[in-house]
Amino acid sequence: MIPQFLRDDYPLEKHLFLIPKFALRLIGFYPESKRNTPLLCWAFFNFLLLGYGSYAEFTYGIHYLTIDMQTAFDALCPVLSSIMSCIKIFFIWWHRREYKHLIEEVRRLTAAQSSVKTMHIKRKFFTIATRLTALVLFFGFNTSTAYTVRLVISNTILYLNQQPIIYETPFRMMFPQPLLAMPIYPLTCILSHWHGYITVAAFVGADGFFLGFCFYFATLFKMLQQDLIDALAVNNSKNSQAIRCEAVMESNLTDIIRRHNEIAQLMKKFSSIMVGIVLSHFITSSLIIATSVIELLLSEELALKAYCSQWYDYSVRIQKMVFLIMIRSQQPIAVKVPFLTPALPMLTAVCIVIVYPAVKNK
């Protein structure tokens, strides 16, 4: 049975950052959560457990590197995700006020648009963002759980064969011997198991934020395009009451320009607080780089929509405002990635050097 939040009829106001909110609240790091002593203690405990677990995994892997390569990599592969999760939640905590401000502004800007067409746009992009982040959570949760299931199955088989069980944790970690002996061993296993879930919650929260913000900014751009099309639509009816008042037209275009500038400022702020996370995760950030291009293309499309409208049928003042929108839309507005700034010339070069020869050879 499909969960309710994955359905098309799920309330739009609940879609906003649904999965990152769930994941980060689980470990006490959601920016909008009310700060109190129990929450701070819970967040500190999870961060400490994640940090020590990463150290224990790394120590275990280095210790077995010259003894058993397979066992060593069984510990070193998960530790990379653990270290990255530790870095991500640190930056989320460090920039929690900025994240809170961005979430509130995105919520305000999206909630302000409630026409039938904009609601359809929001439904489309919000649903995609929720489903993609839910997919990350699903696979991360299953992967982490599989480590514990593997330990349970292997020890069950040993027990049924009347062989001594192996006192190891779900994730291979180097612990003091008393922690791997009864009666403390079950508690150690539980903490190791929870360490895996903290890792999952951290990268789902951080990557979900990035993915979510990109899709929500894309939603704002699409709604901006729709409002521009509606504002510049020429009514050919001879009925004088159907002709738009120029004052209303100016007001609509002024609102579009103001919202466009607000979106640009929000994206600039978002880029500045995501630098640390993206930089530390740059090697595996191809999806992040690809997603960050969405806003660039949609911003350029705004200029195209303005140009294709019948702007020349209006007064000189209205034409100047439309030209301003065209010029502003062609300026780079994208989530910047360290070492790589998405731009149309760069994308064109990639297509010429890589994509076109590959297609031609086929």
Image (cartoon, rainbow, N blue to C red):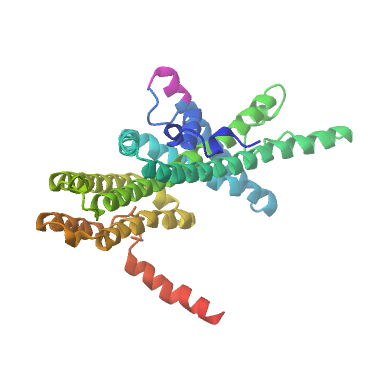
Question: Is 128 situated above or below 301?
Answer: above
Task: Name the quadrant containing residue 3.
Answer: top right
- Quadrant of the drawing holding the C terminus: bottom right
- Quadrant of the drawing holding the N terminus: top right
Give how far across and how far down residue 291 sits, in percent: 43, 54
Magenta region, residue range: 35-42
Q: Is residue 108 left or right of residue 120?
A: left
- Image point (44%, 53%), residue name: 288
Give how far across and how far down residue 78 sits, in percent: 59, 45
Residue reaching furthest front?
238
Give how far across and how far down residue 68 sits, in percent: 70, 52
- Image point (17%, 60%), residue name: 313
Question: Is 66 situated above or below 20?
Answer: below
Q: Main secondary structure of the magenta part?
A: helix
Residue reaching furthest right?
161
In this view, the residue in front, 138 or 110, is 110
- Image point (59%, 31%), residue name: 194
Q: Is residue 38 magenta?
A: yes
Task: Name the quadrant containing residue 320.
Answer: bottom left
Give how far across and how far down residue 10 sits, in percent: 50, 34
Q: Is residue 345 left or right of residue 67?
A: left
Q: Is residue 155 magenta?
A: no
Q: Is residue 88 left or right of residue 186?
A: left
- Image point (61%, 44%), residue name: 139
Task: Name the quadrant containing residue 323.
Answer: bottom left
Q: How many marks?
A: 0
Q: Is residue 46 left or right of residue 229?
A: right
In this view, the residue in front, 178 or 131, is 131
Q: Is residue 68 visible?
A: no
